[in-house]
């Protein structure tokens, strides 16, 4: 399966069911749990995909901090916010031609998406930030309409920062705290991955990050010319925790990783059917050790966190 990137100008709309199917194919984020955790994960699937989650249907990812991720994003001219009264069980976020529509999302969801962090990396929140849900209609104008169509998922995620800052009065500061992490290390017996051959077109590959990671089925990942920091970044969503590369490996590797995702589900991503996964495959922890010769060890380490200094409920408009 050839790795591809999303085309600019698409109407990136995702209902809850489509998000669930797409993320379940990746086998990395379980989308059938309840409450704010599920809504946060769904939101990440929509707007933070290229930063923290595997792509689906053969898409490749871009690493956080890349020029693509850091590019200047448009600003919303109008941001309408109302409490959600639908009572529906899941949320929806949709970027359209001139803006963004969000239904049934918490401020906590928006924060984790906007700053590309996990739940435990947002601290000092009042309780309502996680429990109260909101509907948002935000519009751009002028030249930003055309610019919006060219943004990556990573860049679109950054636009949530404007929403929480302007309409919810968010003020934060960053700290580094000692939190639980997983250390990615070489397992006893050594590496089982294959050293990668040089890519024939390094400039094109470099644009998309260090090598490629392609989903060829539910719970099946094929890597080509992939470095360990990139692998650690991808595995973070499998374990919902920061993964630190402590392998000491500096080269690039090819491998196939097959595991059984935590949640069963249909094998479909964005309307594209994928081959069914191997239900007899091991867990992600066992698969990493048996198939890659690596190991995920529970540890602690410095993790960047977002400390909420101020956040306020907006007046409905």
Image (cartoon, rainbow, N blue to C red):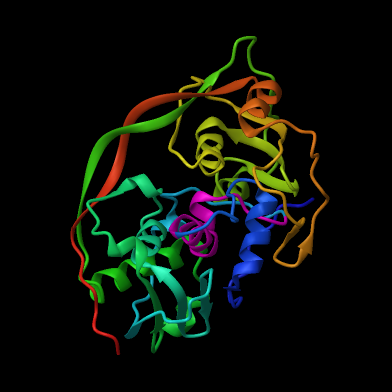
* 189 or 23, nearer to the observer: 23
For the question of whether residue 72 can be seen, the reply is no
Tell me what residue is drawn at x 83 percent, y 51 percent: 275
Image location of residue 307, percent across then percent down: 22, 51
The furthest residue to the front: 87
The furthest residue to the left: 309
Tell me the quarter of the picture where residue 134 sits.
bottom left
Q: Is residue 35 magenta?
A: no
Tell me the quarter of the picture where residue 210 sits.
top right
* Quadrant showing the C terminus: bottom left
* 38 or 256, nearer to the observer: 38
Tell me what residue is drawn at x 76 percent, y 57 percent: 266
Tell me what residue is drawn at x 36 percent, y 26 percent: 300
Image location of residue 18, percent across then percent down: 66, 67
Relative height, residue 142 to residue 302 (above, below)? below
Most common SS among magenta residues: helix
Which segment is the magenta one?
Answer: 36-57
The furthest residue to the top: 189
Q: Left or right? Give the position of 311 relative to 51.
A: left
Image location of residue 94, percent across then percent down: 53, 76
């Amino acid at each position: 399966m050839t790795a591809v990137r999303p085309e600019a100008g698409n109407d990136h709309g995702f209902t809850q069911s489509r998000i669930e199917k797409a993320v379940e194919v990746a086998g990395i984020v379980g989308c059938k749990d309840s409450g704010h955790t599920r809504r946060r994960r769904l939101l990440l699937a929509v707007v933070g995909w290229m930063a923290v989650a595997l792509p689906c249907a053969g898409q490749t990812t871009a690493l956080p901090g890349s020029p693509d991720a850091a590019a200047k994003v448009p600003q919303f001219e109008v941001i309408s916010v109302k409490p959600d009264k639908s009572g529906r069980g899941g949320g929806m976020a949709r970027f359209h031609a001139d803006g963004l529509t969000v239904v049934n999302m918490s401020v906590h969801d928006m924060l984790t998406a906007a700053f590309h962090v996990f739940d435990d990396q947002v601290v000092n929140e009042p309780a309502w930030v996680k429990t109260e849900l909101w509907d948002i209609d935000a519009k751009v104008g002028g030249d930003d309409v055309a610019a919006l169509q060219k943004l990556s998922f990573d860049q679109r995620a950054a636009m949530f920062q404007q929403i929480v800052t302007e309409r919810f009065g968010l003020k934060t500061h960053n700290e580094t705290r000692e939190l639980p992490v997983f250390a990615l290390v070489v397992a006893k017996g050594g590496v089982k991955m294959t050293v990668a051959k040089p890519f024939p077109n390094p400039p094109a590959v470099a644009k998309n990050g260090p090598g490629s990671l392609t989903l060829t089925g539910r719970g099946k990942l094929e890597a080509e010319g992939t470095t360990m920091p990139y692998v650690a970044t991808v595995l973070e969503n499998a374990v919902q925790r920061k993964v630190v590369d402590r392998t000491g490996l500096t080269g690039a590797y090819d491998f196939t990783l097959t595991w059984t995702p935590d949640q069963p589900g249909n094998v479909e991503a964005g309307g594209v059917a994928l081959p069914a996964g191997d239900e007899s495959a091991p867990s992600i922890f066992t698969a990493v050790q048996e198939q890659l010769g690596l190991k995920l060890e529970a540890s602690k380490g410095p993790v960047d966190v977002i400390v909420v200094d101020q956040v306020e409920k907006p007046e409905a408009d």
